[in-house]
Image (spheres, helix red, strand yellow):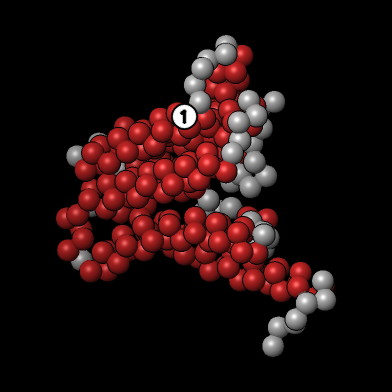
Amino acid sequence: MITGKSTDGPISRYLNRRISSRITSFIVNHDIRISPNAVSVISFMMALACLPLYIFKYLIPAGILVQVSSIIDGVDGELARARGLSSSKGAFMDSMLDRYADMAILIGLIICIQDSLLNPVLLVIAVMALSGSLMVSYLHVRSTHDLNIHPSLVGVLDSIASRDVRLFLIFVFSVLGMPLELLIVLAVLTHVYVIVKSVAVIRHASKTIDTNGGVEDG
């Protein structure tokens, strides 16, 4: 059975999975011998190819490739679950490749607007967009590992800055030819999400401790 994850963001849930699940079904039904890890590498290479496209200002093909990479990124997990091949090693590899893919895409975008980076304010925005993307991923990992709760499952804002949403925004703004505006949106969205969700996770953890008879705050 082809399934998504309970922590899927809205773009994955309502758009990407509708396409990736069909790709996964085709692979499974036709017994195509490709491993989930190989699919992860394919998705990563697609994202990496966006770097030179952005550098040379081919925004539309770069944006489209970003979204295709995002869709393919869902196939590896679906394939692993469908074939009973899920493993912590595969999840670790996929996560690491995703982080490098995100950095390649954002570095390409930053270089794309390099003429504007003479303005120190815009330089800060570019750095905030890149750091915010990494901080969202870091929040998800640390919250799940340290507090046993995924941020998307508590508090408000749902998963408005999850990777699928960020990549979809990159796709849309790239097609519209608005790389600078994109970085501003990502800078604000990611850091607001991290702050709000960090508070929500801490509150949730505190309530859980109190309910279980642990040490109360203060």
Q: Quadrant of residue 51?
A: top left
In this rendering, does residue 193 appear at all? no
Q: Residue at x 57, y 11 (%)?
A: 30
Task: Report the residue marked by disc 1.
Answer: 39
Image-based side of 93 in relation to 29, left or right: left
Q: Residue 64: horizontal and vertical position, in percent?
A: 38, 33
Amino acid marked by disc 1: Val
- Vertically, is 148 above or below 90? below
Looking at the image, residue 55 lies above or below residue 202: above
Rendering quarter of residue 153:
bottom right
Determine whether, in the image, residue 119 is placed left or right of residue 99. Answer: left
61 to 54, vertically: above or below: above
Q: Is residue 15 above or below residue 156?
A: above
Give the x, y percent position of residue 106: 33, 50
| Quadrant position of the N terminus in the picture | top right
Residue 142 rendering spot, x and y as whole percentages? 56, 61
Q: Residue at coordinates 55% horizontally, 18% vertically from top-left? A: 27
Seen at 61% across and 71% down, the residue is 199
State the SS at label 1: helix
User: Front-most of 23 and 143?
Assistant: 143
